[in-house]
Image (cartoon, rainbow, N blue to C red):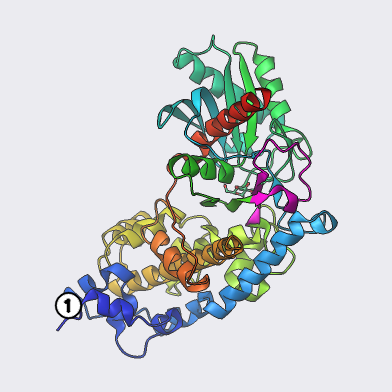
Amino acid sequence: MIPKQRDLVSRRLPFEEQAVPSVDPVRYFGVYDDVVRFADMGYKRHVQATPLIRDKCRELILDNEKLKKLMEVCLDNVHRGLKKDTHAQAVVKCFPTYVQALPDGTEVGKFLALDLGGTNFRVLLIELSGEHFEMKSKIFAIPQHIMLGSGEQLFDHIAECLAIFVKEEHVADQKLPLGFTFSFPLEQRGLTKGILVSWTKGFKCSNVVGNDVVQMLDEAIERRGDVQIEVCAILNDTTGTLMSCAWKNHQTRIGLIVGTGSNACYVEKQENAELWQDVDMGSGKVLINLEWGAFGDDGGLDFVRTEYDEDVDKNSINPGKQKTRQTGTGEVYQRGPALRRQRFRHAVRERGRFYTKYVSEIESDPPGVFNNLREICEELGLKHATEQDYINIRFICECISRRSAHLVSAGLAALISTRSGRRRFHPHFHNLMMEKIKELVHPSIEFDLMLSEDGSGRGAALVAAVAARLQKTART
Ligand code: BGC
C-alpha cells in the first residue's frame, strides 16, 4: 500500500540520511511534495544516483549543527558591520540606507525607476495610487563590452536607454522623479549619494569604484541634454524588494535576493546602526543593506566550503570576493560534482556551458520524469545519455539547490531570531527554506516568506514616494 503523503513527510529523515539511503530509494529520491506520486508511478528502477556521485555530493550536505554555527557567525558579522569600531575590518558591511520608513499605502504619484543589477537592466514608469499601481517597463541589455568598459560608457548607455523609454512613453517633457536601484555594494552618504565600493556579478567598468553613481548618472543625462530627469533616490535591490513587499504586507521587515547575487536587508533601530548619521524623521528606524555576499571573504565560512566552491572562486572575475554569493547561488552548479563519463567531460565540465536556469528546469519536472533534462542534454550535444545519467544529473542539481536554500535559510533565521526581543523560477526553493528556517528558529517565532514580483523596480518608486511623504510630514 502506498503510504499517505503526510505519513511520509512526518517520517522524513534528516537530509544526510535521505541523501545516501541504505533502503527505500524511492523516498530519498522524491522531492518533498512529489514523493507519493513518484512511488505511485511504480518507478523503482535506477532511482538512486550512483555511489560515486552520491559520495561526491556528500560534502554539499549541511546538517543543522553546521547551519546553527553559521547563524552565529552571521550574527557576529552583522554586529561587526554595524559598529563604528569594527566596521572597517568587517566583511559584511551593513550599510545604512537612507530609508527610514516603510510604505503605509498612502503613497501616490508617477515615478520613473531604473533597475540595474545584472546583464539586463530595466526602465520603468510606475504610477502609485493608494492600494493600486500601474507599471510599464522595458528591458535593455548591457553588452559585455560595456560591462567591462569605462564608467562613462556604462552611464551613457543607461542614459540613452532611459531617453528612448521616456520618449516612447511620451513623458520626456515631464520632469519625473526617478528611483535608481543599483544592486552593487554601495556606501550611501545620502538618499541621492552612493559611492560604489566594488563591482560584483561580472561588471568591471573603470572609474566607478570610489565615485558617486548618482552623480555619474546625472552627468550622463546632462551630456545628452534631451531629457529632464531628477534622480531622487538610490537604493539596493534588497531595499526595493523589502519596500515592495511591505507595501503589500505592512508586517514585512526583511528583504532577500537570491539570484545572480545574494543579499539581504532588514529594518534596524537607528541607535544600533552606529554609522547612521542622518536626522531621525520620526520612525527611529533605518533599513540596513547587509551586503552579505561578502560573508566568508575572511575565511569565516570555510567550514562549509567545498572543493567546488574553491574552483568557482579561483576562476571568478574577482577571486577571493563574494564567497557567499558563489556558494549560495548559481555558479557552483557549473562546477559541481561532474559526471565522470568520458563523453560528459566536454559537455558538462566545460566552464559556463551548464546554465543555472537548467537546474530550475530540471527540477521542475516531477521526480522520475526527465523531459526537460532530456532536452537540455540534447542542447549540450549529449544525445546518448541514459536514464541513470539523468538520475545522476538531477541528484547533483538537487543537492546544490538544497545547500543553497539551507545557507540562505541560516542567514534569514539569524535575522529573524534577532527580531524576537528563492527563487521565483526554482520550483522548490521556497519550500526548502520554509522548512529549514522552522527547524532553525525558536518555535515561538512566527514568520512567513512572500515572493516579490518586480520588487526592485517598484521598490525604487516606493523609496522615492516614501521620502516625499516624510519630507511633507516634516514640513507640516
Ligand atoms: C550585490 C548586492 C545585491 C545582490 C543581489 C550582490 O552581488 O553586491 O548589492 O543586492 O548582488 O542582486
Q: Residue at x 31, y 76 (%)?
A: 9
Residue 102 seen in the figure: yes
Residue 178 rendering spot, x and y as whole percentages = 58, 25
Does 339 sit above or below residue 352? below
| Beta carbon at label 1 within 8 Å of ligand 1 | no
Residue 289 inside the magenta-drawn segment: yes
Residue type highlighted by circle 1:
Gly
Residue 177 rendering spot, x and y as whole percentages = 58, 21
Residue 199 rendering spot, x and y as whole percentages = 69, 45
Q: Report the front residue among 130 and 231.
A: 130
Does 164 sit above or below residue 405? above
In the picture, the quarter occupied by the C terminus is: top right
Taking 167 as reference, is 229 left or right? right
Q: Report the front residue among 307 and 467.
A: 467
The residue that label 1 is drawn on is 42
Local secondary structure at mark 1: loop
Q: Residue at x 63, y 75 (%)?
A: 69
Q: Start and end of the magenta stretch?
A: 268-292
Residue 266 rendering spot, x and y as whole percentages = 60, 51
Does 189 sit above or below residue 45? above
Residue 157 seen in the figure: no
